[in-house]
Image: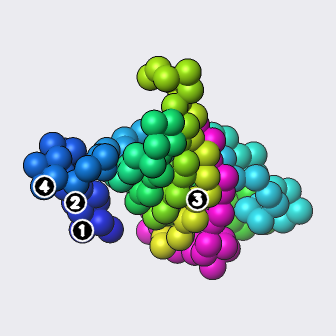
């Protein structure tokens, strides 16, 4: 994962002046840096018959796009973006006759590589433009993160079990589609 991030940061640092110096006409390389908000809806994460409430999670996107001028108004754009998406969940607790557990700081991280293919239209011959196309994404990692506190019942009182409590990271890639398809408009 770290190597992909280093590669994307390196590619984002490359300036369009390098391309112009090589006499590539009407082609620019642009870094893409942004934030996103995502939330996962569905009943696959739950306790018993109850699903957890999901909340928006802040993520980010890094990458680059190559833009080619096709005419005075139209441009073709192809890019490669790393995107961190996911969801946060409400804290919850559950218990049995002899055990009680509390789950806190529960969130899901979805790591995607996206390949957008877009057409850009300059509107009114100004700096105002619209872009639309298709985007294919590949999920290469999905993890759940949470903290938990476990309590064991000893006669009439609950005793904290420090050996069973702590933070957990679980690979949940099998729960999600590996391919993501979208129609971006910006």
- Where does the N terminus fall, quadrant-wise? bottom left
Q: Residue furthest right?
A: 49
Q: CA distance from mark 3 to mark 4?
A: 29 Å
Does residue 74 show up? Answer: yes
Residue appearing at x 66%, y 71% in the figure: 176
Q: CA distance from mark 3 to mark 1?
A: 23 Å
Is 37 on the left or on the right of 1, as rendered? right
* Place of residue 156 in the rendered image (x, y in percent of width and height, measured from the top left): 71, 56
State whether residue 74 is above or below residue 8: above
Question: Which of 39 and 13 lies nearest the eye of the viewer?
Answer: 13
Q: Is tag 2's residue or tag 3's residue first in the polypeptide sequence? A: 2
Q: CA distance from mark 1 to mark 2?
A: 5 Å
Residue appearing at x 30%, y 49% in the figure: 27
10 Å crowding of disc 3: few (<14), some (14-19), many (20+): some
Are the residues flagged by discs 4 and 2 in contact, CB closer than 8 Å? Answer: no
**Tag 3 residue:** 135
**Tag 1 residue:** 3
Q: Which label lies toward us, 3 or 4? A: 4
* Place of residue 75 in the rendered image (x, y in percent of width and height, measured from the top left): 47, 45
* Place of residue 126 in the rendered image (x, y in percent of width and height, measured from the top left): 47, 20
Question: Which of 157 and 126 lies nearest the eye of the viewer?
Answer: 126
Residue appearing at x 10%, y 49% in the figure: 21
Q: CA distance from mark 2 to mark 3?
A: 23 Å
Residue appearing at x 26%, y 50% in the figure: 25
**Tag 4 residue:** 22
């Amino acid at each position: 994962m770290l190597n992909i991030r280093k590669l994307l940061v390196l590619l984002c640092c490359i300036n369009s002046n390098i391309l112009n110096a090589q006499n590539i006409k009407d082609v620019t390389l642009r870094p893409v840096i942004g934030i996103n908000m995502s939330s996962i809806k569905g009943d696959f994460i739950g306790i018993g018959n109850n699903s957890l409430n999901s909340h928006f999670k802040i993520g980010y996107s890094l990458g680059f796009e190559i833009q080619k001028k096709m005419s005075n108004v139209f441009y073709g754009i192809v890019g490669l973006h790393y995107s961190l998406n996911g969801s946060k969940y409400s804290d919850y607790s559950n218990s049995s006759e002899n055990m009680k557990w509390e789950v806190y700081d529960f969130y899901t991280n979805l790591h995607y590589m996206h390949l957008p293919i877009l057409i850009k239209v300059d509107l009114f011959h100004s700096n105002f433009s619209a872009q639309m196309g298709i985007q294919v994404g590949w999920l290469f990692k999905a993890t759940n993160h949470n903290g938990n506190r476990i309590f064991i019942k000893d006669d009439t009182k609950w005793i904290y079990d420090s050996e069973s409590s702590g933070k957990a990271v679980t690979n949940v890639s099998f729960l999600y589609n590996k391919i993501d398809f979208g129609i971006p408009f910006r």
